[in-house]
Image (cartoon, rainbow, N blue to C red):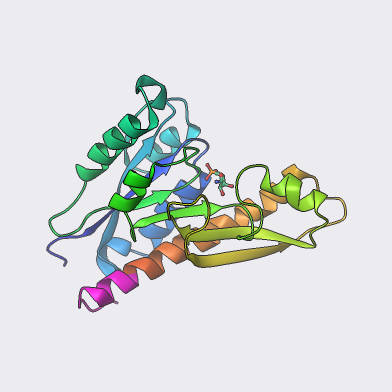
């Protein structure tokens, strides 16, 4: 058993299907025993995010920090960082997983969590950073679309790429049908990327993986 563990905090704003996929894989693949990691909380900047209910049903603690209650982005991000820090373990600051978290984070927040801040973006980065990725891929005549798990850096959707999924664009696709098929692949690559991150962290800490 690990004396301390790697806490994982997941940030959401909406439906939370990626969050649910991560929590399900963590439970099924026994991340707690095998990788010394636990999803300790799901935080949302929106009180009505559907993912909050999902998280509670999966037995995960939830917290809401409404961004509108804060005077500016810096103050919101400081409050967010303070909530996350409450879940830190000795020598083990949280891995922060953005899963449909629709807020641009300040450079200060990103710097504070550098190397342990991951995001999923619904395009094959570096193509189509920002919003409306599926519509833009269709308009550009792309034959393939996909999703990217990446480290978060100060510049939007531009940190080191960890995993990608590729989905063929079909002649009859709309932005919605394409988004649905890409989302199904997000649920596969995000847990995989996190598991790899955890294995690397164990290796860096000189711990051997438990099988
Ligand atoms: C996903 O497509 C993700 O890539 C994007 O927002 C969507 C979130 O979906 N950033 P969900 O909340 O995980 O269901």
Image coords of residue 126 (percent x, y) = 61, 60
In magenta segment, residue 157? no
Q: Is residue 67 in view?
A: yes
The one nearer the camera, 14 or 132, is: 132
Residue at 37% of width from left, 26% of height from top?
A: 72
Q: Which part of the image, by quadrant, shows the C terminus?
A: bottom left
Q: How many labels does the image show?
A: 0
The magenta segment? 199-211
Q: Is residue 169 left or right of residue 93?
A: right
Residue at 49% of width from left, 41% of height from top?
A: 16
Check the image and name the residue furthest to the right: 171
Residue at 64% of width from left, 60% of height from top?
A: 124
Image coords of residue 136 (percent x, y) = 74, 48
Quarter for ligand 1? top right
Q: Is residue 210 in view?
A: no
The one nearer the camera, 112 or 12, is: 112
The one nearer the camera, 94 or 189, is: 94
Q: Is residue 95 left or right of residue 206?
A: right
Image coords of residue 201 (percent x, y) = 29, 70
Residue at 51% of width from left, 49% of height from top?
A: 156
Q: In this view, does 22 lie to the left or right of 71?
A: right
Q: In which quarter of the image is residue 170?
A: bottom right
Q: Which part of the image, by quadrant, shows the N terminus?
A: bottom left
């Amino acid at each position: 058993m690990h004396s301390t563990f790697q806490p994982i905090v997941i940030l959401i704003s909406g439906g939370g299907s990626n969050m649910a996929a991560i929590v399900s894989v963590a439970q099924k693949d026994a991340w707690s025993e095998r990788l010394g990691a636990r999803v300790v909380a799901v935080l949302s900047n929106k009180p009505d995010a559907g993912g909050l209910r999902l998280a509670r049903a999966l037995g995960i603690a939830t917290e809401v920090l409404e961004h509108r209650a804060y005077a500016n982005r810096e103050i919101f991000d400081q409050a967010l960082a303070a909530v996350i820090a409450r879940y830190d373990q000795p020598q083990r600051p949280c891995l922060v997983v953005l899963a449909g978290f629709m807020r641009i984070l300040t450079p200060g927040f990103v710097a504070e969590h550098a190397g342990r801040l991951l995001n999923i973006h619904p395009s094959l980065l570096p193509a189509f950073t920002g919003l409306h990725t599926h519509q833009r891929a269709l308009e550009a005549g792309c034959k393939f679309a996909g999703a990217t798990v990446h480290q978060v850096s100060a510049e939007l959707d531009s940190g080191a790429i960890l995993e990608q999924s590729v989905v063929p664009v079909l002649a009859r696709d709309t932005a919605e049908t394409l988004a649905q098929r890409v989302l199904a692949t997000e649920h596969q690559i995000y847990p995989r990327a996190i598991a790899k991150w955890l294995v690397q962290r164990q290796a860096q800490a000189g711990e051997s993986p438990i099988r």
